[in-house]
Amino acid sequence: MADSPKTTRRQDYTPPAFLVDTVELAFELDPKATLVRSRLALRRNPAAPQDAKLRLDGEALELLEAKLDGAALPAGRYSLGEDGSLTILDPPQSGTLETTVRIVPEKNTLLSGLYTSGGNFYTQCEAEGFRRITFFPDRPDVMSRYTVTITADRTLCPVMLSNGNSDGSGHAEGNRHWVRWVDPHPKPSYLFALVAGDLINVHDQFTTKSGRLVSLNIWVRRGDEDRCGHAMDSLKRSMKWDEDVFGLEYDLDIFNIAAVSDFNMGAMENKGLNVFNTKYVLAQPETATDGDYQGIETVIAHEYFHNWTGNRVTCRDWFQLSLKEGLTVFRDQEFSADQGSRAVKRIRDVRGLRAAQFPEDAGPMAHPVRPDSYIDIDNFYTPTVYQKGAEVVRLLHTRLGAEAFRRGMDLYISRNDNQAVTIEDFVGAMQEASGVDLSHHLHWYDQAGTPEVTAEDSYDPATRRYTLTLRQHTPPTPGQAEKGPLPIPVAMGLLGADGAELPTRLAGENSAQKGTRLLLLDQAEQRFTFEDVPAPPVPSLLRGFSAPVRLKGVPQARLRFLAVHDTDPFVRWDSGQQYAAAFMLEQVARVQRGEAPGFDPALAEAVANTLDGAGADPAFAAEALVLPGEGFLADQMQVADPVAIHQVRQAMRREIGTACAAKLRATYEALTDTGPYRIDGHSIGRRALRNACLAYLTAAGDTALAAAQYDAATNMTDQLAALSLLADTDSPAREKALAAFHAKWRGDDLVLDKWFSIQAMSSRPDTLAAVQALYAHPDFDLKNPNRARALIGAFAAGNPLHFHDAGGAGYRFLADAVIALDPINGQVAARLIGPLGLWRRQSEARGALMRKELERVLAAPNLSKGTFEKASKALA
Ligand code: B3K
Ligand code: ZN
C-alpha cells in the first residue's frame, strides 16, 4: 500500500527560503503538448535560514531544460523529487533560473493548472495548481511581478489573455501569433491566469472615482454574448459600491472575466482576469432562475472584491484562508444587502449557514475558521472558512460599529498592501483603529464547533428589576475536547406584553436606551440586570443573528409572541421557524412511536397572517412561509430520522395547504404578473411568494395548478418551480413536462443541469432507480463538474429521504460514483463524498452501511489525497 499522504501543520510554518522578484513566462500553446518557458529572478530571503534549500514545487511536469544564470544545469546540480519538485543544489545567493517544461492541457481532467474545455485553454491555480504549469515556490507568501507571453495558432486562439495590462502583440511563424501581458502588481502564483481560444467579448467601461477609465470585458463562447448583461451590470455596481463603502478603487486599465463550462468551483479572482463557471455569468429570464441571478450578482461581487481583500493584501499561508475568504464573503453579503432587502438577505445567509456550516461543525470534518492542519488544502474551502469566517468578521462590525470597522479596514489595507499576512494582522488593525481589546476575539478563529447559548430570566415586581442570565457552551469537536467561552455579542431588546419595544437601562447606566442594544457575553455565564422594567418583559435575543451560535430553549409561547411582535425582522422570521421546528420534531417523535403526526392550528394561523400582511414585503413573507427544511430538522436531532422527518414535513405542508387553500389561491392569483420580467427585489419577492403558495396548494393535492404554471411560464423561475413540484407527483403532467423540458433545453448545459437535479431531488419512491438511469443517460458527463454535482451532489446532499435508503443503496450509489470520479477529478470527488461522512448523526444501522461504503472508497487504488482525507477522517 502507498504511503499515507502527508499532513501540513500550521505550527510548522517557515518563511520561504528564496523570493522571486520577477517571473517571465512564455507559453507555446498546444492542447497535446504545451511548452512553458519560465525565467525567475530569485534571491535568498533574508528572513529565512541562510542554509535553506532552493526547492521549487512541480506536479505532472516534464522537464526539458534547466539553466542557472544562462548556463545549463549539469545533472549533479539539481534533483527531481518523487513529489515532482525540483531542488537546486548549492544555489547562489541570487540568480536567474530558467526552465522549460512540457504539459498536456487536453489530458488535464483535474481542471487544476492549464487545461482545455471545448477546445479553449483555461487555468485554475488556487490553491496549488501553478505547480502544474511550471516549477515554482508555489505558496502565497512568494509575491512576484509577472510578464507573460502567449503564442498560439491564430485560428484556434484568436483571443489570448493573462493578468494585468496588455503590452504588445505580433505575428509568429506559421499561422501563429503572440501577445504579451504585464501585471504591474506583485502577486502570489495562485493568482496567475491564462485564457486563450475562440472567445467573444461583451464590452463596457467604468471610470473610477479618481478618473481611471477601465475597460470591462466578459469573454464567452460564441452564442452566449446575449446572456452577459446581468453579470456586467453586477460588476459595475460592485466597483461603485467598493468605492463608496470601503473607498477601494480598481487598479488596472482592464478587467477581464472569462466564463468556462468545465470548472471545479464557482469562480476565481485571478488578478485582472477572473475565471468564472458559466453558471455564475450567463443568464436570461428564460434560462436562469431568480436564484441564479442572485448567485451571479454575489459571485461577481465576491471575486471583484477580492482584488483588495485577497489580491493586494494576500494570505501568508493557506491556514489564513479565511483572512481573504471570510472577509470577502462579509463584503459580498453587505453589497447584496445594499442592493435589495437587508433583512431578507440576512435570513437567507443564516439559512445557508445553518444548512451547511452547522452540520460541518457537528461532523468529522469540523475545523476552526483557521484550521490547524490539512492533508489537502482544497478540502478546506468550506462553509466554516467562508460563511462562519464571514460571521466572525461581522462580529467585529457589530461590536465596533460601521465607522470604527471602516477605520480598521483602512488601516489593514494601507499597512499590509502588497504583503502576505495573517489573521492577527487583520484583527490587530481592527483593535488599533478602534481602541477595543480584541485579543479574546481571536479564539473565534481557533476554536471549532457551534456555541450553544441559553437564557434564563426573572422579574422582581418589588424592585422592578429584570435579570437575564446568559450561558454559553460549545460541544467538543474531533481533536478539540475542551472548549472555552467566546466573546458573543448578543443584540437584544425587551418587549412589553403588548408587543411594544421597551427602553432598556442596565444597572449602573444613567439613562435608558431605545431599541436594540448589545450585550457582550464573554464568559460561560453572565448575568445582566435591567432597571425600571414596568412588568415582566419578553426578551428578544440575537437580533439580526448577531453571532453564529445556536440559541436554545426559548419557550414556544415566547417564540409565538416574538414571531408576531418583534421589531427585528430576523427574530420575527427565526422565531416562526424555531416554533415550527420544535413542533415538527415532536411529531417526528410520534411517528417514530408508530403514531400519526398531529397538527398545530397555530401553524396555519401563522401562514394566514403572513399572507394577509404579505403585500408590504413579499420577499420576507416568502421566507416566513417556508417551513424549516429537512436538513435543518435533522441537524436538531441527536440521531436523525430522514424518513420520519420527510413524512412530518409533508404532512404539515398538506395540512397548511388544505387549511389555507382559499387564501393561498387568492394570493397566488393576485401575484400573477403580466408585465415584463424584472429582477429587482420586489419582483423576485413576488415570484417567490407566489411559488411558495403554489407549493402549499400542490402539497394539498392540486397538481393542475402546477401543470398550468409550467405550461404558461415565460421565465425559468416560474417554470422550474412548477417542474420541481410536479417532479414529486404521480401526475401524468410530470412525464410530459420533464420530456418537454429535456427536448427544449438539451443543447443548453446550464439548463440541462437543472433537469438532472430536479429528478435527483424528487421524493418519489422510484427516485434512486431514476438517478441510476440518469447516471447512464447520454447527456450525463462525469467529467463535467457542474453535471456531476447536478446529479450526484443533488441526490446525496439534497435528497436525504432517498440518499438514506434503509438498504444502503443510496450510499452505494454515491461511493460508486466517487470511486469512478476520483481518478478523473479528485477535487470534485472529495467534495461529493461529504454526505457519507456524516454517519454519526444517523441510526446505527445506517451508520454501519455508510462506514462500509467509506471503507470501500478508501480501498480504491491510487486514491487522491483529497478523497483520502475526507474518507479517512470520517472513519477516524
Ligand atoms: N478563491 C476561489 C476558490 C479557490 C478554490 C480552490 N480549490 C474562489 C473564491 O473564493 O472566490
Ligand atoms: Zn473567495
Image (cartoon, rainbow, N blue to C red):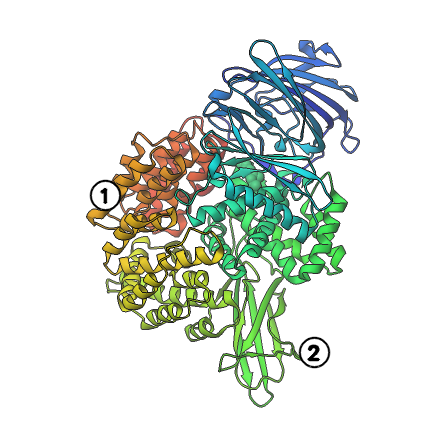
Q: Which residue is most to the bottom?
A: 462
Quadrant the N terminus occupies: top left
Residue 624: image x %, image y %?
Answer: 42, 63
Q: Residue at x 47, y 58 (%)?
A: 682
Q: In the image shown, does 578 or 75 lie closer to the viewer?
A: 578
Label 2 – label 1 distance at C-alpha: 68 Å
Name the residue rendered at 36%, 32% in the picture: 747
Q: Is residue 28 left or right of residue 874?
A: right
Residue 796 in the image: x percent, y percent?
37, 43
| Residue 509, disc | 2
Residue type of the residue flagged with mark 1: Lys
Q: In the drawing, what numbered circle is on residue 736?
A: 1
Which percent across, then down, holds residue 101? 60, 16
Residue type at numbered disc 2: Glu
Q: Quadrant of residue 854?
A: top left
> Which corner quadrant of the image does residue 255 belong to?
top right
